Image: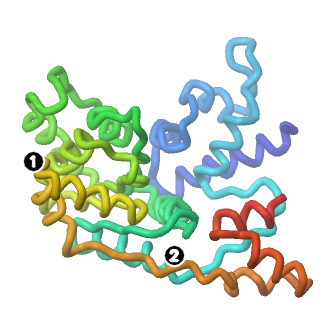
Amino acid sequence: MENSIKDRIMSAADDYLRMNGLTAAELCRRAGVSASYYSVAAKGKYTYQDTEIKDVFFRKLASAIGMRLETSYWQHADTTQYVQIVNTLDEARERCEARMVLGETGCGKTYAIDRFCGANPVGVYRITVNDCDTLRGQIAAVIMEPISFNCGCFAGIREYLQQVREICTKNGIILIFDEVENLKRTGIKAIKAVYDGVRYVVPVVLVGTPEFAVALQNLKNKGVKGMAQFIRRFKAGQTALAPIDRRYLDFMEQIKDEELRQLLSRIADNYGELHDYLER
């Protein structure tokens, strides 16, 4: 990557901080980059302790501030699913209520969350669930202040959540758990504890595939403790995203070749795959 491009990224990042009232440390946390590298790069120097700062640092930073580096053939479209997700997130934040958003793979859930987070850089935190995550790791990853936690997963959780509650109240936080279909039993119980600990103060939004609802119901049918209560907490606020229209009319206007349009409609199973085909 040329230094002129790095210069543009660092200048745009500085503007982003100023416009949104963020600190460099907060931006680095969101982008998943080194704050030490940032402090050096912000001065126009692109080596840290005699080591060149890799291009991935600048690409992650550009992505976090919504700066596009390459020409893209993928244009944003207000799909039905996108509008549903954003409206649900806005409503949850405004009313401080729990929500669950379920939609098929590739319908744009993560994309919509990314844009929502980019448009609301203060107080909106997304936690992507994976099999290796713990409650402590998930929450601590998005809170801007250290939290003491010296006990097991559930022992002492009341004290832990009190700290979360105080910090979230001060920062006006909304917690978005993405890809919740990856949650195991302990993770589901942990999120229930989070919800109970911050209820009426912090809205909690779960986003995933319909398989998550099936898994919850199976656990409830097996008599797993706490599953019925978990379902009750989110059932009234559940949003089922509309099925994907495989004609992809929202994206086809830019494609003039009718044969190519028909081919893409046949081979792309969802928006994610359509994006991949258009960008390659």
Does 30 appear above or below 115?
Answer: above
Per the image, label 1 sits on a secondary structure element best described as: loop
Three-letter code for the amino acid on which mark 1 is drawn: Lys
Say which of 222 and 245 sits in front. Answer: 222
Say which of 136 and 107 sits in front. Answer: 107
Query: Would you name the residue on which mark 2 appears?
Result: 82
Q: Closer to the observer: label 1 or label 2?
A: 1
Q: Residue furthest front?
A: 222
Please state the horizontal and vertical placement of residue 111, each as a whole percent of the image. Answer: 56, 63
Please state the horizontal and vertical placement of residue 170, each as a whole percent of the image. Answer: 22, 50
Please state the horizontal and vertical placement of residue 128, each as a whole percent of the image. Answer: 43, 47
- Tell me how far mark 1 sits from mark 2, CA to CA: 35 Å
Q: Residue at x 81, y 56 (%)?
A: 70
Please state the horizontal and vertical placement of residue 267, each as a whole percent of the image. Answer: 75, 70
Q: Residue at x 39, y 47 (%)?
A: 182
Query: Would you name the residue on which mark 1 appears?
Result: 225
Say which of 132 and 46 sits in front. Answer: 132
Counting residues from the start of the chain, the first of labels 1 and 2 encountered is 2
Q: Residue at x 69, y 87 (%)?
A: 249
Q: Residue at x 41, y 60 (%)?
A: 208
For the N terminus, the quadrant is top right
Q: Can you see residue 250?
A: yes
Q: Can you see residue 115?
A: no
For the C terminus, the quadrant is bottom right
